[in-house]
């Protein structure tokens, strides 16, 4: 059988995933995909940590539709960069904020105050990402992702406008779906999105 999987890397990923799963408590599962950016070949593929485990052991979580978490944030900021209303040095507030009936929080339930967009993305902060998504437009964001090849499931996009950012931010996709998108590969292979020519910092309203 011919494969591009790197045996050592595959074993390392499996070991890493099993170790990380312990932090999430009993029954947690992890999927992982490692793509070589220069060739676009999949070098490691993990659908779950234990094929015979009690929790979805025989379900390929790398292809199962579920929340992509922070994997969509680079696309939110990328579209904002294209629109020109934000760049990496722009300042944005990470503080308790409500978007309609949605009040996003980070995993640690803490807030960092005023940060640069670059730092917001590096730290995967949720409030800044949703604030930028509001400016980009949730419906347009989902439409552009689909046009780029992402397979998303958004059950609540018919919701009132105030709820649409939550619907877009919580769209379901398989982890392998963003990896197949040209824009994702461009972001991984190039610094174009994140290191434009220096500009004066400005605050996002």
Image (spheres, rainbow, N blue to C red):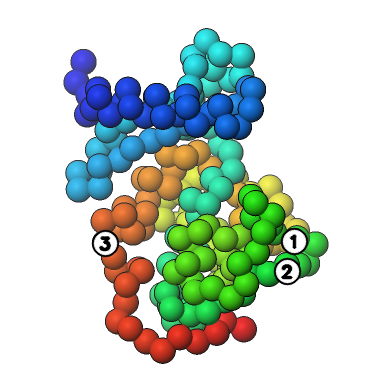
User: Few, some or many C-alpha atoms within 10 Å of disc 3 (few <14, some 14-19, many ≥20)?
Assistant: few
Question: Left or right: where does residue 19 sit relative to residue 110?
Answer: left
Q: Quadrant of residue 41?
A: top left
Q: Quadrant of residue 141?
A: bottom right
Residue drawn at (50%, 31%), measured in percent from left and top?
20
Residue drawn at (43%, 78%), measured in percent from left and top?
89
Task: Name the residue carrying label 1.
Answer: 103
Q: Is residue 5 visible?
A: no
Q: Position of residue 168 (x, y in %)?
A: 62, 57
Q: Position of residue 152 (x, y in %)?
A: 54, 47
Where 200 falls versus 81 (above or below)? below
**Residue sitting farthest toward the bottom:** 200
State the SS at label 3. loop
Task: Name the residue carrying label 2.
Answer: 97
**Residue sitting farthest toward the top:** 52
Is the C-beta separation of discs 2 and 1 under 8 Å? yes
Lower position in the chain sequence, tag 2 or tag 1: 2
Residue drawn at (32%, 30%), measured in percent from left and top?
44
Q: Position of residue 175 (x, y in %)?
A: 47, 40
């Amino acid at each position: 059988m011919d494969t591009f999987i790197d045996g050592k890397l595959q074993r390392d990923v499996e070991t890493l995933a099993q170790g990380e799963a312990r932090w999430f408590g009993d029954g947690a599962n992890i999927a992982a995909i490692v793509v070589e950016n220069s060739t676009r070949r999949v070098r490691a593929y993990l659908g779950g940590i234990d094929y015979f485990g009690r929790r979805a052991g025989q379900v390929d979580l790398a292809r199962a539709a579920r929340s992509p978490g922070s994997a969509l944030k680079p696309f939110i900021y990328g579209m904002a960069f294209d629109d020109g209303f934000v760049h990496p040095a722009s300042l944005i507030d990470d503080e308790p904020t409500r978007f309609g009936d949605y009040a996003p929080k980070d995993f640690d339930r803490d807030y960092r105050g005023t940060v640069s967009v670059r730092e917001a993305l590096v730290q995967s902060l949720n409030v800044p990402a949703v604030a930028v998504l509001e400016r980009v437009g949730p419906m347009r964001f989902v439409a552009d992702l689909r046009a780029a090849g992402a397979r998303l499931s958004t059950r609540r996009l018919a919701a009132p406008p105030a709820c649409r950012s939550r619907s877009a931010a919580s769209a379901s996709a398989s982890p392998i779906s963003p990896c197949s998108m040209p824009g994702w590969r461009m972001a991984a292979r190039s610094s174009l999105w994140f290191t434009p020519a220096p500009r004066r910092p400005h605050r996002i309203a």
